[in-house]
């Protein structure tokens, strides 16, 4: 499966962006799709995940501001980002996991994911 994240850009603090993650090659309806971000000089960090059944998990830093959702008919997962802060500035990546876990906490781990898309840059100005 190929994943493509898009929708990034420059936005003022307090603004919003929606990042689509479009999949091609096969359906992703049975996959958990995670969102990660990486700022220069830092490690890639977990942002959010939506499982095949629609369960979600968020990093504490984005909880209440970001929403992850999926549209299986369009083979696309979305990350809606509201109330953006300068510290949200990073390259955002989506990734697919072939496995299902009993605990959502597994999806926080970068190494659990099998397929990665190219990132999209989000810059939040103060």
Image (cartoon, rainbow, N blue to C red):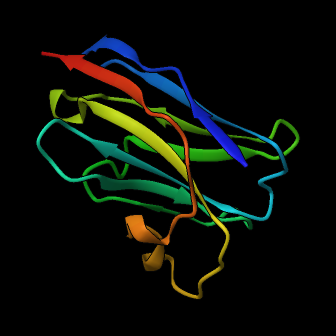
Q: Residue furthest right?
A: 73
Residue at left 65%, top 79%? Answer: 100
Residue at left 45%, top 54%? Answer: 48
Residue 40 vertical position relative to residue 6 in the rendered view, above or below:
below
Residue 13 visible in the current orientation: no
Instruction: Out of 70 and 6, give the one closest to the viewer.
Output: 6
Q: Quadrant of the C terminus?
A: top left
Residue 41 visible in the current orientation: yes
Picture coordinates of residue 71, whole percent (x, y): 77, 42
Picture coordinates of residue 29, whole percent (x, y): 80, 57
Residue at left 20%, top 38%? Answer: 39
Instruction: Out of 7 and 99, give the one closest to the viewer.
Output: 99
Residue 111 found in image quarter: bottom left
Picture coordinates of residue 104, whole percent (x, y): 50, 76
In the picture, measured across the screen, residue 57 lies left or right of residue 46, that is: right
Q: How many marks?
A: 0
Residue 78 found in image quarter: top right
Residue 10 vertical position relative to residue 77 in the rendered view, above or below:
above
Residue at left 39%, top 64%? Answer: 110
């Amino acid at each position: 499966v190929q994943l493509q994240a898009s929708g990034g850009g420059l936005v003022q603090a307090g603004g919003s962006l929606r990042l689509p993650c479009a999949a091609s090659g096969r359906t992703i309806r049975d996959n958990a799709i995670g969102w990660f971000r990486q700022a220069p000089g830092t490690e890639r960090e977990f942002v959010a995940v939506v499982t095949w059944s629609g369960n979600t998990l968020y990093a504490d830093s984005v909880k209440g501001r970001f929403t992850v959702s999926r549209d299986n008919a369009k083979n696309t997962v979305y990350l809606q980002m509201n109330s953006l802060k300068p510290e949200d500035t990073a390259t955002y990546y989506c990734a697919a996991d072939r496995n299902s876990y009993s605990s959502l906490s597994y999806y926080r781990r970068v190494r659990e994911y099998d397929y990665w898309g190219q990132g999209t840059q989000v810059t939040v100005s103060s």
